[in-house]
Image: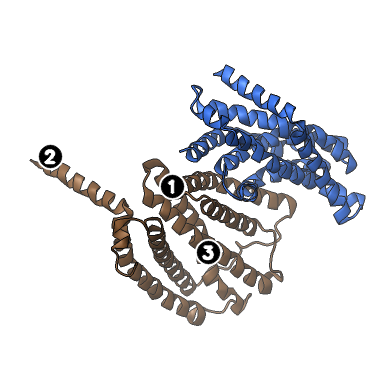
């Protein structure tokens, strides 16, 4: 079972390494969205410092959402997803593998890039640490919940906008606790409660989301 | 003998339920129930409206503006109940694989979205004279808005999928994920609100309610329930007709040619 998991992850990573542009595009998108905010609201440093946690987190949400379509769509088009469904491995293992691979390709790069972006907003060192940790805990939740949306909208017309409509409301708790923790750190308070709640949310979506994604995939291929 | 008759009764009961689970059997039954529930809705709404607008005392703080509560509170209640009811139908359809359950879930969704919108709209109309603003980022308002997004998501997903059976089951998965998320969203918004804004407005410090107000509100809530049932049945009949349009029994229906 672990072998199946590993090979799914390795396969998805290898495929995206052959098309590096996809991964890079989402990172560039993340940076561009963050850059737009100072241009929109003005370059007042205090204002930007106060808005930075929300801006970075909203940009991370949007970048994650855009990359979700990639999770199953190309495998669906070339038929390999159907082969995975009828393979000997349990569908749950395959889904978990694809979710992990998606996070490694979208959540992790954004997390690593976030401190650099945070410096642009003059975040304190402690706030930068909290921002990185909150993204490290929070972006897997985005992949997990997003997987449900990606599976539900598989092959559906207008899938991209529909996916956003389904998934963004469910992302709200992650946004609240992720950005909230950074704001607390900026105010000199402990970010631990927010990060713990994010962790709890991660634990819960680890239980619910793979099941729902599996069910949604079965619906799509019924 | 006794056991046999019991078993037969049980079978009869099962048959009766399963018979109604078939769209063909449910269609005429729903048609017979709609006038009753519609009449009950009017029957509850008339005294409810009379009590709320003519009998209930004027609020000494808010004046006449508070009377929107008689629409606002039942609408807010219904918006939440209907999402749970929708998710229950959806889960039933997913578990028992009955066709009618998915149709009921899609029939309930627009009514739920309508009540959610009504609650937000009347809330804004109430907020302007009492708080001096149409909108505040209060926990209840924000989570009600997110509930509206969840309804829109369900409706959009079921509309986007052409195959009705797949649409029902995909919608069911979404509705179940949504119903798990609703309490999480509500509490996270509540904590976000108290952490970031302080208690700017409190809806809970309302003065103790006069009995006429309470009775008026309950009557309006009952009217909203009856209306929702009638509207959902009306809509499910249309959905049945649309999906079964090629079936022989639909072709033989009078008025459908």
Answer with left or right where residue A176 lies relative to residue A211: right
Residue A131: numbered disc: none
> Foreground mark, 1 or 3?
1
Q: CA distance from mark 2 to mark 3?
A: 48 Å
Mark 1 vs 3: CB contact within 8 A: no
> Foreground mark, 2 or 1?
1
The quadrant the C terminus of chain B occupies is: bottom left
Letter of the brown chain: B
User: Considering only vertical position in the picture, is A119 above or below B210?
Assistant: above
User: Considering only vertical position in the picture, is A135 above or below B86?
Assistant: above
Q: Nearer the viewer, residue B116 or B47?
A: B116
- Residue A154, image x and y in percent? 57, 41
- Residue B163, image x and y in percent? 47, 48
Mark 2 vs 3: CB contact within 8 A: no
Q: Mark 1 and mark 3, same subunit?
A: yes
Secondary structure at badge 1 equals helix
Q: In the rendered picture, chain A carries what hue?
A: blue
Q: Earlier in the sequence, mark 1 or mark 3?
A: 3
Q: Residue at x 50, y 43 (%)?
A: B173
Query: Which residue is tagged 2?
Result: B3
Q: Residue at x 55, y 51 (%)?
A: B157
Q: Mark 2 and mark 1, same subunit?
A: yes
Residue B115: numbered disc: 3
Query: Which residue is tagged 1?
Result: B165
């Amino acid at each position: 079972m672990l072998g199946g998991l590993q090979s799914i992850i390795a396969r998805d990573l290898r495929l995206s390494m052959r098309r590096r542009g996809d991964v890079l595009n989402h990172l560039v998108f993340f940076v561009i969205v963050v850059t737009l905010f100072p241009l929109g609201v003005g370059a007042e440093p205090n204002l930007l410092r106060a808005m930075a946690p929300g801006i970075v987190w909203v940009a991370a949400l949007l970048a994650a959402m855009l990359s979700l379509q990639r999770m199953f769509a190309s495998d669906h088009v070339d038929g390999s997803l159907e082969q995975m469904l009828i393979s000997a491995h349990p569908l749950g293992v395959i889904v978990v593998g694809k979710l992990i691979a998606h996070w490694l390709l979208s959540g992790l790069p954004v997390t690593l890039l976030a401190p650099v972006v945070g410096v642009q907003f003059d975040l304190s060192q402690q706030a930068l640490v909290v921002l990185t940790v909150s993204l490290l805990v929070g972006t897997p939740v985005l992949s997990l919940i997003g997987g449900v949306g990606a599976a539900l909208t598989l092959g559906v017309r207008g899938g991209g906008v529909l996916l956003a409509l389904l998934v963004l409301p469910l992302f709200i708790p992650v946004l609240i606790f992720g950005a909230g923790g950074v704001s607390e750190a900026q105010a000199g308070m402990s970010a631990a409660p927010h990060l713990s709640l994010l962790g709890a949310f991660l634990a819960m979506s680890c239980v619910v989301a793979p099941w729902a994604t599996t069910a949604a995939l079965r619906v799509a291929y019924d | 003998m006794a056991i046999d008759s019991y078993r037969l009764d049980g079978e009869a009961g099962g048959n009766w339920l399963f018979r109604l689970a078939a769209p063909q059997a449910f269609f005429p039954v729903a048609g017979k129930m709609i006038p009753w529930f519609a009449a009950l809705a009017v029957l509850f709404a008339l005294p409810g409206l009379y009590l709320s607008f003519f009998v209930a005392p004027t609020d000494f703080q808010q004046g006449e503006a508070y009377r929107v509560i008689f629409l606002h509170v039942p609408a807010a209640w219904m918006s939440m109940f209907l999402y749970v009811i929708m998710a229950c139908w959806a889960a039933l359809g997913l578990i028992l694989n009955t066709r009618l359950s998915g149709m009921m879930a899609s029939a309930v969704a627009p009514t739920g979205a309508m009540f959610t919108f009504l609650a937000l709209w009347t809330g804004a109309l109430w907020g302007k004279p009492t708080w001096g603003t149409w909108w505040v980022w209060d926990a209840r308002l924000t989570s009600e808005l997110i509930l509206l997004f969840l309804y829109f998501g369900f409706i959009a997903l079921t509309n986007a999928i052409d195959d009705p059976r797949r649409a029902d089951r995909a919608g069911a998965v979404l509705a179940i994920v949504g119903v798990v998320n609703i309490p999480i969203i509500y509490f996270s918004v509540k904590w976000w609100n108290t952490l970031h804004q302080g208690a700017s407005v409190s809806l809970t410090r309302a003065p103790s309610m006069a009995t006429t107000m309470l009775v008026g509100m309950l009557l309006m809530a009952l009217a909203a329930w009856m209306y929702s049932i009638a509207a959902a049945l009306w809509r499910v009949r249309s959905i049945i007709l649309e999906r079964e349009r090629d079936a022989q029994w639909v072709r033989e229906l009078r008025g459908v040619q």
